[in-house]
Amino acid sequence: MSIKIGIVGYGNLGKGAELAIEQNEDMELVAIFTRRDLYTLNNSKMVNISEIERYKGKIDVMILCGGSATDLPKQTPKIAKTFNTVDSFDNHVNIPQHFEKVDKIGKEFETLNLVSAGWDPGLFSIYKILSESILPVGNTYSFWGEGVSQGHSDAIRRIEDVIDAKQYTIPIESALNKVRSGKNPVLTTREKHLRKCYVVVEDKADKVAIELEIKNMPNYFDEYDTEVNFISQKELDENHAGMPHGGYVLRTGESKTGTKQRMEFVLELGSNPEFTSSVLVAYARAVKRISDNGQTGCLTVFDVPLAMLSPKSNATLRKELL
């Protein structure tokens, strides 16, 4: 029996989720809920977001594909009152608060919800637990990019008079090399990454004010050296159409004898949203299985056994992968 999935939002992440579901034979896409004009989308699965309550009992898990800046803090708690959900909330400093709010709602309304899935937070978070447990004496480092950050790009687009934007996160190579050498450097946020922004604005826009707002945006840009470039829509479309990304998690440490050890997890992504949505789809499978066992409230990737992500049986996993 297939897992019935709904998608909320049809931006880059929602379109990626639609494609990812097609690669999973145990899943069926029931509907895509959007605020957009349905007549312009030419997709039979499209439903206006105002109709979402009519699908209660028809969808096993909703994959929420809105942005973390303004969408998910409101959407996840609201939709979790009716449906099991998975979201990709990635504002790290606010994850505990987001979790507590959704956990309370899930327990009250008897739904199960998994927040902050993706690759960071998500897969990077899992690797940090793994590497820190194996090498308890050492240091953990995360580097992102070079690539387009969806959350940061979305945050810029929410600024008044901004038409479109792309934000690239660029690791500083000298800092990465220090870590790989085993020097265990103490690095500030600013020493690890540069943020480069390409922004399209209205003709009447105050570019100086917009640049200041970007550079001082809490939890997004204020702790980084940030470069803001104002360009035309044509230039953005021609030169910044792709959505590549990736990153590294490194754990450097020592065994009891003083022997140096290093663990490294690397992602090189041709499409950030297509990869992130594939992670969300896998966790939707886990939410359905765990929900069927009667659990309610909220989960993170820390609470899900890896076998729950796979369509294969435990016996098959033991035979093929162990």
Image (cartoon, rainbow, N blue to C red):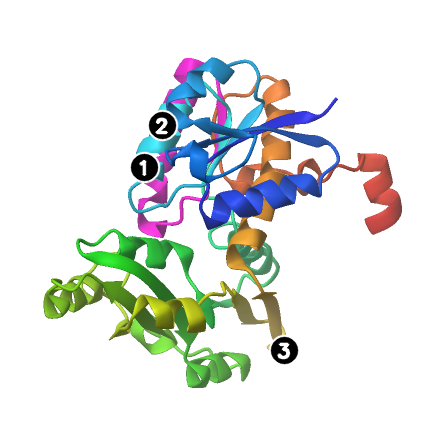
Disc 1 secondary structure class: helix
State which mark lies toward you, 2 or 3. Answer: 2
Q: Secondary structure at mark 2?
A: helix
Q: Residue at position x 18%, y 68% from top? A: 211
Q: Amino acid at mark 1?
A: Pro
Q: Amino acid at mark 2?
A: Pro
Q: Is residue 306 left or right of residue 198?
A: right
Label 1: which residue? 73
What's drawn in magenta, residue-wise?
A: 88-114
For the residues labelled 2 and 1, the Cα–Cα distance comes to: 7 Å
Secondary structure, magenta segment, majority class: helix
Q: Is residue 165 left or right of residue 317?
A: left
- Which of pointers 2 and 3 lies earlier in the amino acid sequence? 2
Residue 126 shows in this picture: no
Mark 1: give few (<14), some (14-19) or many (20+) Cα within 10 Å: some
Instruction: Answer with the quarter of the image where residue 200 lies.
Output: bottom left
Q: Which residue is at the front of the view, 23 or 138? A: 23
Q: Nearer the viewer, residue 213 or 14?
A: 14
Question: Which label was assigned to residue 77?
Answer: 2
The number of callouts visible is 3
- Which percent across, then down, holds residue 73? 32, 37
Q: Mark 3: which secondary structure? A: loop
Is residue 183 depicted above or below 4 in this figure?
below
Answer few, some or many: residues within 10 Å of disc 3's Cα (few below 14, many 20 plus, some between 14 and 19): few
Q: Position of residue 274 (x, y in %)?
A: 57, 53
x 14%, y 68%: residue: 207
| Above or below, comparing residue 202 to residue 118 in the picture | below
* Nearest to N terminus: mark 3 or mark 1: 1
Pointer 3 residue: 259
| Disc 3/disc 1 C-alpha distance (Å) | 45 Å
